[in-house]
Each structure stands twice: as C-alpha cells, then as structure tokens.
Amino acid sequence: MIESNENLSESSQSRIERNRQKALAIRQAKLVSHPNAKSTAVSIDKTTIKIGSTRYKDTGGGFLLEEEPEKDLPTDSEATAEPPVVEDDRPNCVKCQKPIATSWLFDNFLYKCCDSCKDPEEHKLITKTEALKTYLLKDIDLEKREPPLKFITKKNPHHVRWGEMKLYLQLQVEERALEIWGSKEAMEEERLRREDKRVILKAKRYQKELKELRMSMRSSLYDRTSAAAHVHEFGPETYNEEEDTYSRSCLTCSYVETFEKM
C-alpha cells in the first residue's frame, strides 16, 4: 500500500512537472508575441487602441479583446475613378477620323479632336468678355441655351487679384453665334446697326454735355429764351396826326406796330 502511494506520488509529481513546464512555455510564447513588446499603442477612441496593425477593444473587465481585421475599403481615387474607355465607346476624331485615345479638347470641351490633330491656331481659346463682344452674344446664349458651352477657368494674367477668367473654345462660340444669327452676313448687319446706333448716341451725349457746359458757364453765345416764343409787351400808344395812324412799340424788343382806328 505504501509502495502504491509512492508510485502515485511520483506519477502525480511527474504530471505536475509536465504541466508546469507546458504552462511556462505557453507564458513565454505569449510574452514574446505580445504586441506591447515591439509596437507602440495608438489610441483610436476611448475604447479602442491600435498596436501595430491589430486593433484591440477595451472590454472594461481588465483585458483587451482583439478585433477582427477590417476588409480593405476602396480608396477615394479608386471609388471616383472613371471606368476605362472601351474601344467601341471612343468617339472618332473630326480630323483624322480615328478613335480618340487621348484628347485635351474632348476632356475639357467635349470637342472631338485628338491631341495629335490639335492645332494651336485653329483651336484657340477666347475669354467670355471677348466672345460676347465679338459675336454679339449674351450670357444666356453661353450658359443657359442648350447645350451650355463648356469652359475652363484661369487666373487673370493682367490682374492677379481679380476673379478667374472663363475661357471658351472659339470654334464652339462661333457655331453658337451662327445658330442665333443664322449667318455671318446677318451678324455683320447687326454689328453695323449697333455701331451706327452707338455713334448717334455718342453724338447726342456730346451735344447734351456741351449744352450743359454752356449753361453752367452762362456764356453769351447761348440764349436761354431762344427756344421759347416771344410775347410782345407794348407800351403806350402814340398818334400821328399827319398820317392819322396810331403806333406802339414793344418794351422788350425793337418791334413797332402801326394801326388805324375806325
């Protein structure tokens, strides 16, 4: 019986020793792989910290709970990136009639011309002010009439503090003007009519300013009563016995009226 107890004690001791060694090994492994040993904890919010690439949730019970890794979300550039242009969807260039691969004019103005055929002289840009003046257009013709013309903005090179300029493609502005006026001849007739009207208004404005200047200076060359009808103010009558006539003179001018009495 004593021998059996000794054997049990030895087996128990050996089992205890194995368990103790196993526990020490597990503990040592945890200490080595614990993220605090190599990484710095970063606080995400009041209950979440990030150590390395792993997030831990503070349960409030004295230990941290490892969160499941989040799936990679698409970046802003990936989310907003335009779908690739399929060969069949590419418009043909108006000059070379080939599918457009890259086009600055199409990207900014929806004008179907590839970069290879782009001509600085033919595809000029024009400011909004110049477009309205040259082609006798209004703001509504560029911005409201369907389809509204595309434009790009650029800082004013002459006045840096001014607002940005709107630049339109001159070819598209000219096409819009022909839609409104019908032909170049009609547009030129309207231009001449406006020019004549402008000259007449300018002459009238000049005459008005000159008249106001004369009145303000009270020049003797201008008579304020010249435009009004003169009314004679006669003095007393005089009798001419030899001719048996009566006469009276105006007190404000040299007019003399002669008459007879029956």
Image (cartoon, helix red, strand yellow):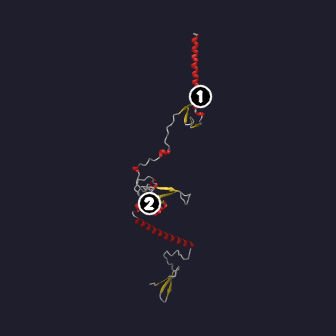
Please say if 243 is above or below 130. below
Q: Which residue is the extreme one toward the top?
A: 1
Q: Amino acid at mark 2?
A: Leu
Point 49% across, 58% down: residue: 167
- Dot 1: few (<14), some (14–19), or many (≥20) neighbours within 10 Å? few
> Which residue is at a point 58% across and 12% down the rendered structure image?
5
Q: Secondary structure at mark 2?
A: helix
Rendered residue at 59%/21% (across/down): 17
Marks 1, 2: nearer the viewer: 1
Q: Secondary structure at mark 1?
A: helix
Relative to 190, does residue 81 appear above or below in the rendering? above
Q: Is residue 195 left or right of residue 16?
A: left
Place of residue 225 in the rendered image (x, y in percent of width and height, measured from the top left): 51, 75
- Number of residues whose C-alpha sits closer than 10 Å to that of mark 2, classed few (under 14), some (14–19) or many (20 or more): some
Image coordinates for residue 9, horizontal then vertical, percent: 58, 15
Please say whether residue 62 is visible from this viewpoint.
Answer: no
Can residue 238 be seen in this snapshot? yes
**Residue with the most extreme bottom position:** 242
Question: Toward the viewer: 104 or 55?
Answer: 104
Query: Which numbered marker is on residue 171?
Result: 2
Q: Amino acid at mark 1?
A: Gln
Q: Earlier in the sequence, mark 1 or mark 2?
A: 1
Give the vertical position of 131 relative to 229 (above or below).
Answer: above
What count of labels does the image hold? 2
What residue is pinned by disc 1? Answer: 28
Quarter of the image containing the N terminus? top right
The C terminus: image quadrant: bottom left
Q: Position of residue 232 (x, y in %)?
A: 50, 78
